[in-house]
Image (cartoon, rainbow, N blue to C red):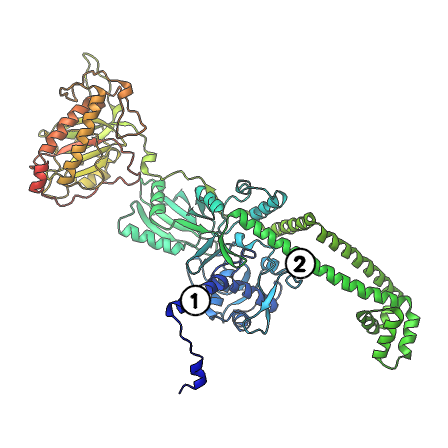
């Protein structure tokens, strides 16, 4: 039963008030005591407690390793009342050289791998502090930082470490709190130190000045930062998106002569084995083409992922697809959030450096005050010993006459006006200190102590002197632990596609009556003068002849309209190039294309064929990469007809039909010759085929639009490249089942 005194302590309270207060308490506990780093030393509480506990255990460089279980148990029992897994995982991360730019713990055993393998249990691994971690704990016993009671008030723990190392910037930090998160990238120590020194010398320096020293993040796994805009945004606003790409090179395999891509560095926190699996899955799903084999040859010497390519495949095009579809290109979302006096604030690069300088200035000031106080205490003792040595005979006489130690202490203090500490030091002095050599050492020590006291007072009286010490200590740190950049920064050059490697040149495209198509350069033909003799464009079978011949650029689109009103497109450079007099072949389309001969424009469906009959025409209209139904096609054709009519009015083209094979001269106004589909690009006024073809396009599209309700004849169309289409995605789509137009769509057409 519940006693009456217990019932009296139950107070009525609204549940919404209790939930609100409890959630706020929990949120602040997570934000301040777990998830976010302090802006001064860049450590979360668990990392700070691990380093301090290892320092107290004497696990310093040069000492033997100790089991990680010892460290975990000591941290849990003294400072961090949470789960052992959280403590051990934090310890493991400080060991991994692929997680921290400058590891703080030296581990022995299996501490995981870059492929995502977990570390061994803490009963199997051993650890001790690294040399760079000792700079974080340097002078912690000189009252440089504040201490608070631990969770059970038995011990004291530091609220922050002295941290000569600018750990928040050089090692970064990541954490998820309640309603906020932080993700600070690591940087190069030498660059950060140069920036701090410059900021100390020039307090009014701007972000632009600081960026001359800090080029950008420097990840422990290297790789390449692609573009500088994200870095600028991160440093100026406190958050930004930084694109990281794997470092890869294309080389030729000696045994086979094939090209292969070798990846040696991956983006930060990306597993090479995971990328290996992604590439394999994409190849099996036929989303990546041109890859014959993928091998992960990584070992103790370093990372090496080999991607073998098929013959005649351009490595840069495949590499661009790998960047697009795999984690070989990753975006690092930087959020520079840290605790400032217990409050989470998003900080710019300049503010992070200023807070670190302020912290180090405070540490130097408190350390100097501590050293001054200790030197003054020592001076006081030495002055008492000097008095005793100068009056040694009288001191010995007073001590011999005293009946006990307290009476001797009182007599000495009264006779020579000594303090309690001085008289106690005299009574505890050994007789060996009375030799001439020891007396000389005593005098020299007193002289040195007084000199040191004077120096400490000068430091405390001069802020420039303290700043000079700050710069000297950081410069010494950079000389001891600084290294070269691992991450390269390159400018964003835009997306790369196969068209970037194909010169834009005019091609002659021929289509036979039987439906065979090929292309060859215009240079294969020669100008025919009066009475001259032409060249043979192709050897055809008896029942076949060239029905269409037109000129188009390698970057143009060719559109194929089926009998069912659907549309396929293909780039001109994807049409097989054949010899000028090559005969048509009856091989399958795939085999024909692989042999770079003729390619037959027949659909893979036996029920539907691409029409290339008398109703075919050319059109400057990119209708897209997908199959287009009759309804969509009718709407698009209507819009195109209006645009083409406006263009004809602008160019003053005569309203009579022209055949492409019989060009006529038409005067055009160069100032009015503007293509609405190509903003900012002026077409060539002298291109008679482009001008005279506009009218035939209009007539062909009108005939096609009128016949959409009864699709019996298809059409062939050539379209110029549309500026809105992205590069690297131009591939022929497989034929889809035909869709019959509805009666409503036929009436609209």
- Find numbered disc 2 in the image and state the secondary structure of the residue it sits on: helix
The correct choice, above or below, for 717 with respect to 400 in the image is above
Label of residue 366 in the image: 2
Quote the CA–CA distance across marks 1 and 2.
38 Å
The correct choice, above or below, for 265 with respect to 691 in the image is below
**Residues tagged 1 and 2 counted as in contact (Cβ below 8 A):** no
Which one is in front in this view, the residue at disc 1 or the one at disc 2? Answer: 1
Q: Is residue 718 left or right of residue 129?
A: left
Q: State the count of labels.
A: 2
- Find numbered disc 1 in the image and state the secondary structure of the residue it sits on: helix
Residue 587 image-quadrant placement: top left
Looking at marks 1 and 2 on the same chain, the residue that comes earlier in the sequence is marked by 1
Q: Nearer the viewer, residue 286 or 440?
A: 440
- Tell me residue 253's x, y (percent): 38, 44
Q: Nearer the viewer, residue 736 or 638?
A: 638
Residue designated by label 1: 21
Q: Looking at the rendering, in which quadrant would you find the N terminus?
A: bottom left
- Tell me residue 300's x, y (percent): 47, 56
Task: Report whether residue 598 is seen.
Answer: no
Q: Is residue 162 left or right of residue 631?
A: right
- Tell me residue 446's x, y (percent): 82, 60
Task: Report whether residue 437 is seen.
Answer: yes
Q: Residue at x 49, y 44 (%)?
A: 236
- Tell me residue 167's x, y (percent): 55, 55
Q: Is residue 91 left or right of residue 617?
A: right
């Amino acid at each position: 039963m519940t006693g009456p005194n217990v019932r009296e302590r139950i107070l009525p309270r609204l549940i919404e008030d209790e939930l609100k207060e409890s959630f706020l308490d929990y949120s602040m506990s997570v934000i301040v005591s777990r998830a976010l780093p302090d802006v001064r030393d860049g450590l979360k509480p668990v990392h700070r407690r691990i380093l301090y506990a290892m320092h107290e255990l004497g696990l310093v460089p040069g000492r033997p390793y100790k089991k990680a279980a010892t460290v975990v148990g000591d941290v849990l029992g003294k400072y961090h009342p949470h789960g052992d897994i959280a403590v051990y995982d934090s310890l493991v991360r400080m060991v991994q050289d692929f997680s921290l730019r400058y590891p703080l713990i030296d581990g022995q055993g299996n501490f995981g791998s870059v492929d995502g393998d977990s570390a061994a249990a803490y009963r199997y691994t051993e650890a001790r502090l690294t040399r760079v971690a000792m700079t974080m704990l340097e002078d912690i016993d000189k009252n440089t930082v504040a201490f608070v009671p631990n969770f059970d008030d038995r011990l004291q723990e530091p609220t922050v470490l002295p941290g000569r190392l600018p750990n928040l910037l050089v090692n970064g930090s990541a954490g998820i709190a309640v309603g906020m998160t932080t993700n600070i990238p690591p940087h190069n120590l030498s660059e950060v130190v140069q920036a701090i020194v410059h900021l100390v010398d020039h307090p009014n320096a701007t972000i632009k000045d600081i960026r001359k020293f800090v080029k950008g993040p420097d990840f422990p796994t290297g790789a390449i930062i692609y573009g500088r805009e994200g870095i600028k945004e991160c440093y100026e606003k406190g958050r930004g998106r930084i694109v990281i790409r794997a470092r890869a090179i294309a080389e030729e395999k000696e045994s086979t002569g094939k090209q292969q891509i070798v990846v040696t560095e991956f983006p930060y926190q990306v597993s090479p084995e995971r990328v290996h699996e992604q590439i394999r899955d994409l190849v099996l799903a036929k989303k990546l083409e041109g890859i014959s084999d993928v091998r992960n040859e990584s070992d103790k010497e370093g990372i090496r992922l080999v991607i073998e390519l098929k013959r005649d495949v351009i490595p840069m095009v495949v590499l661009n697809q790998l960047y697009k579809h795999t984690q070989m290109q990753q975006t690092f979302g930087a959020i520079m959030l840290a605790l400032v006096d217990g409050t989470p604030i998003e900080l710019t690069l300049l503010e992070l450096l200023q807070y670190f300088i302020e912290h180090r200035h405070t540490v130097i000031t408190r350390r100097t005050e501590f050293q001054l106080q200790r030197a003054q205490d020592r001076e006081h003792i030495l002055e008492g010993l000097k008095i005793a040595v100068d009056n040694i005979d009288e001191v010995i006489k007073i001590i011999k006459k005293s009946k006990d130690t307290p009476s001797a202490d009182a007599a000495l203090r009264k006779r020579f006006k000594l303090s309690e500490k001085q008289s106690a030091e005299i009574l505890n002095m050994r007789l060996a200190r009375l030799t001439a050599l020891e007396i000389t050492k005593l005098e020299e020590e007193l002289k040195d102590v007084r000199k040191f006291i004077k120096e400490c007072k000068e430091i405390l009286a001069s802020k420039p002197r303290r700043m000079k010490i700050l710069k000297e200590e950081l410069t010494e740190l950079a000389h001891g632990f600084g290294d070269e950049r691992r991450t390269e920064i390159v400018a964003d050059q835009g997306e790369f596609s196969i068209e970037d490697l194909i010169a834009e040149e005019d091609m002659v495209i021929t289509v036979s009556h039987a439906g065979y198509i090929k292309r060859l350069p215009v240079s294969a033909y020669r100008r025919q003068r009066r009475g001259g003799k032409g060249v043979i464009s192709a050897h055809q079978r008896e029942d076949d002849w060239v029905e269409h011949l037109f000129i188009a650029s390698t970057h143009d689109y060719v559109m194929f309209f089926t009998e069912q009103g659907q549309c396929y497109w293909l780039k001109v450079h994807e049409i097989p190039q054949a010899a000028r007099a090559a005969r048509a072949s009856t091989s399958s389309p795939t085999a024909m294309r692989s042999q770079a001969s003729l390619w037959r424009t027949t659909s893979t469906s036996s029920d539907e064929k691409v029409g290339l009959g008398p109703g075919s025409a050319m059109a400057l209209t990119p209708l897209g990469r997908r199959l287009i139904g009759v309804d969509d096609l009718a709407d698009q054709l209507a819009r195109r007809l209006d645009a083409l009519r406006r263009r004809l009015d602008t160019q003053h083209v005569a309203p009579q039909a022209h055949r492409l094979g019989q060009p006529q001269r038409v005067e055009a106004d160069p100032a009015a010759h503007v293509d609405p589909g190509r903003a900012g690009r002026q077409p060539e006024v002298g291109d008679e085929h482009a001008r005279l073809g506009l009218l035939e396009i209009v007539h062909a599209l009108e005939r096609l639009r009128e016949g959409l309700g009864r699709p019996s004849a298809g059409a062939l169309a050539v379209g110029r490249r549309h500026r809105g289409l992205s590069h690297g995605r131009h591939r022929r789509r497989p034929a889809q089942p035909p869709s019959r137009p509805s009666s409503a769509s036929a009436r609209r057409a």
